[in-house]
Amino acid sequence: LYEDEIDGLGYPAFYVFYGCNKLKNITVDENNKTYTVSDNALYSKDHKTLYKWLNNDIKTPNINPATTKVETMAFKEANIETLDLKNVTDVMYCAFANCKYLKNINFSRVNKTGKYGFANCSNLTEITLPNSLTSIGNGGFAGCNNLKEVALPNSLKDIGEQGFANCKNLETVNIPQNIHDLCENVVENGSKNQFVFAGCDKLKKVLVDPNNEAYTVDN
């Protein structure tokens, strides 16, 4: 279903179901050794990878407990409201982007979120990220307009450019010990602001771990 990623962009050069956000029925031959359909989703045969969510009428998807990866655009624009990621460790490019009804997420064991993984999930108001999380990709939570508070774990080592950009109502955030680059000095094409919190105009409380060697807060 995919080709190799394009360097610098982070998404597949070719994806069979690109833009098919209303796809709701896939039939897989029982002799197919690579894919299977169960619980309203297209999976790898061993259920370790979820490729495509297929039922927009269900508000709370039941992700298979064997699943460790949610692939590119798997839930993009889905009507889900509550999400339990169970044993998922890798959330790929745009996996949950534009899920405008999504309100609650149990991140459980997530290790990394890819570029724009949860971008434009406009109904999120608060997220608590797990201590397993080490990386948030570019634009990972960008455009989550109702997000007011973010608790970043001490395990986090990297936040990509514009990770929380344009979260218009974000008021409180903490900076863990190991975050040493918030992209405040990164400029794209000479003009675009790549700061992790660019456009977060209501941000008024930033807590920095006292052991962080790069940042501090001075009243």
Image (cartoon, grey):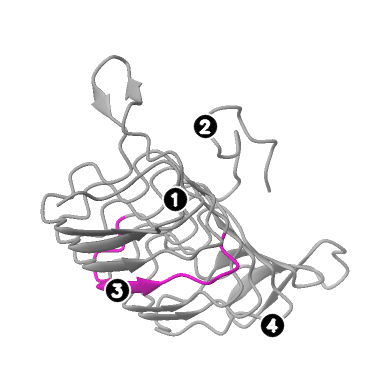
Label 3: few (<14), some or many (≥20) within 10 Å? Answer: some
State the residue in front, 127 or 178.
178
The residue at 44%/50% (across/down) is 212
The residue sitting at the left extreme is: 202
- Mark 4, Cα crowd under 10 Å, few <14 / some 14-19 / many 20+, is few
Residue type at tag 1? Asn
Mark 3 vs 1, N-terminal side: 3
- Tell me the distance, in whole angstroms, between the alpha carbons under discs 4 and 2: 30 Å
Q: Is residue 64 rendered to the left or right of residue 210?
A: right
Label 4 sits on residue? 65
Quadrant of the rendered image containing residue 173 = bottom left
Q: Earlier in the sequence, mark 2 or mark 3?
A: 2
Q: Can residue 101 be seen in this view?
A: no
Q: Could you tell me which residue is drawn at 83 percent across and 73 percent down?
A: 30
The range drawn in magenta is 120-133
* Image position, residue 9 (x, y; %): 52, 32
Point out residue 39 in the picture as x, y percentages from the top left corner: 62, 83
**CA separation in Å, label 1 and label 2:** 30 Å
The amino acid type found where label 3 is placed reads Glu
Mark earlier in primary sequence (3, 4):
4
Does 144 sit above or below residue 192?
A: below
Q: Name the residue under label 3.
A: 126
Foreground: 78 or 114?
114
Q: Mark 2 points at which residue?
A: 9
